[in-house]
Image: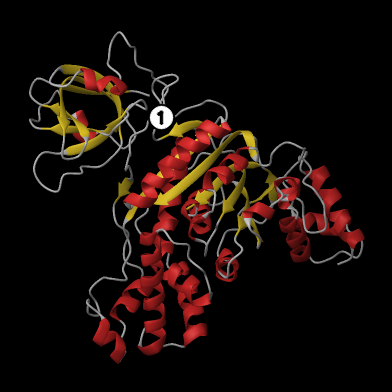
Amino acid sequence: MNEQQREQIIQNAKYLQKVRPIDPEEIYEYVEGTPHPATVRQVLREQASRLGLLERTDGCFEPVTEESLSVAFHGVDAVPENIPRAIEDVLVERFGPGWPDGSSGETLRSSIRGFKQQYLDGASVTYDEDTALGYAVYHLPAYFATVQYVLADLLDDGLLPKHLRILDIGAGVGGPALGIDAIVGDSALVEYHAIEPSASADLLERLLDLTGRNFHSRVHRIPVEEFDPMTALASPNGERNSDETDSPPFDVILFGNVLSELADPAQVLVESFSWLTSDGTVVALAPADRNTATGLRGVERLAEQQGGATVYAPTVRLWPNERPESESWSFRRHHDLAVPSFQRRLDEGERTESERTAENQPAGSGEFVNVDVQYAYSLLRCDEQTAVTARPSRSRVAKMADSDQHVTDRVDYAALKLSHDLAESGNPLFLVADGSQMVDHFAVLTSESALNRDLLTAEYGDLLLLERVLVLWNDDESAYNLVVDEESIVERIPS
């Protein structure tokens, strides 16, 4: 097809989108040479982002509306089977059908052990082809689920548009991208841009082929420091979208488990604020382990101070002009995923002699099964919005910044619930915070009643009114315990 024919298709589409759904079966008759409708459809798909078109299930196209995106989300139970099949296809191509066994299985298992240890040591991970495959086997399922849970919060608050432009910094092998496609489906026109300079980009591009008809992706194989956001939405030949201005282009900027690997994560995070639309959101995710989760809180605070952004969730600052200094090892947890076939096969794979000699855990022990969905996250915005809009009154409740004045007293606090039950046994224990705390505060339920049960049943990030809690100093943990007993009342406050 020549450029004149392409331009005729585009002009016909621009005219018809103001009149009725665009049907390739109709347009082809008005194009010089009457190209096949399938060819017209392909051109419209290629130009959908530029023209702002959604492709319907009947093959017609219609303009994407300006309303907020709304989709039903009921959690994630498993990774769809087409994803494990695609990953196993790549594993077979790389290692052969016996990829979980022998030397190839040893290579993958060694790779996974290696990058897990590097994460724990705070070291950077270098991604070659084998590391990328190991990463896909071990991490992709949880990352696929995690991004959906976080985006669901933004969806519930009406903060994602139906024409959704996403920048995924450090996109890895594609777990977040596939998760975005899964939760959005065909309900939105998604322009997805990935920054991934490592060898992971090869597998990422392969897996992006699994995304739907309205998910339009582009991979930038460059470091984030070289990325030019103002030209990112231009097509490779330099064409710009019909509605594009000089304003920042992205509705969501995602840092998916990558901040801990950047040399200056706060600087990159602050820089990304200038790439957001006026009502856009930066989504920063981190593994739930202490080092990376508390590291995320540190980067969040630096970015807030240096970039002027507001913490939208979950660690909302309830008091004006107050900033926390506590460690805040806070993470969110959901139910486990079903074990994907490739994880089970690698875990049960036949070991080499060197593995049998060196391994502490036998085959089938679950060492290479990773279906826990738990993560730290931060949502940052530049429009001063927060997920919790209610604010406490100084005449009604105490600030956690002043808890040293209330030890052994019964006090009222307004606080966010920021953990699941942390107690391995005994009394339920929850991290709580109000954004002013200098050290961590934990609510300890010593006597459950109908009046304090909201401490147990509230969701992560919910705002609670804690009345008549006994303030004690825990010398072992260097933290405050807020004892919730039969005299205490806990009430969830609508946000």
Q: Residue furthest bottom?
A: 353
Which element is circle 1 on? loop
Quadrant placement of the C terminus: top left
| Residue nearest the observer in this picture, 354 or 3 | 354
What color scheme is it? secondary structure
Horizontal side, residue 19 vs residue 451: left or right:
right
Return the x and y of residue 12 as percentages of the image width and height. 84, 49
Q: Position of residue 451 (x, y in %)?
A: 14, 23
Q: Residue at x 50, y 43 (%)?
A: 283
Label 1 crowd (10 A; few <14 / some 14-19 / many >=20):
many
Figure check: 349 above or below 72: below
Is residue 9 positioned above or below 452 on the image? below
Q: Residue at x 37, y 32 (%)?
A: 325
Asked if residue 351 shows in the view, the reply is no
- In the image, 414 versus 56, the foreground residue is 414
Query: What's the residue at 29%, 85% (across, down)?
Result: 355
* Residue at the top extreme, as displayed: 395
Judge whether residue 231 can be spotted in this image. yes
Residue 248, horizontal then vertical, whole percent: 69, 38
**Relative to residue 117, is residue 284 depicted above or below?**
above
Q: Left or right of 175: which side holds 484? A: left
User: Label 1: which residue?
Assistant: 316
Residue 6 as seen in the image, left or right of residue 134:
right
- Number of numbered callouts drawn: 1
Q: Callout 1, which amino acid?
A: Val
- x, y (%) of residue 327? 33, 39
Among the 4 quarters of the image, the one containing residue 297: top left
Q: Nearer the viewer, residue 405 or 126?
A: 405
Quadrant where the N terminus sits is bottom right
Q: Nearer the viewer, residue 102 or 270?
A: 270
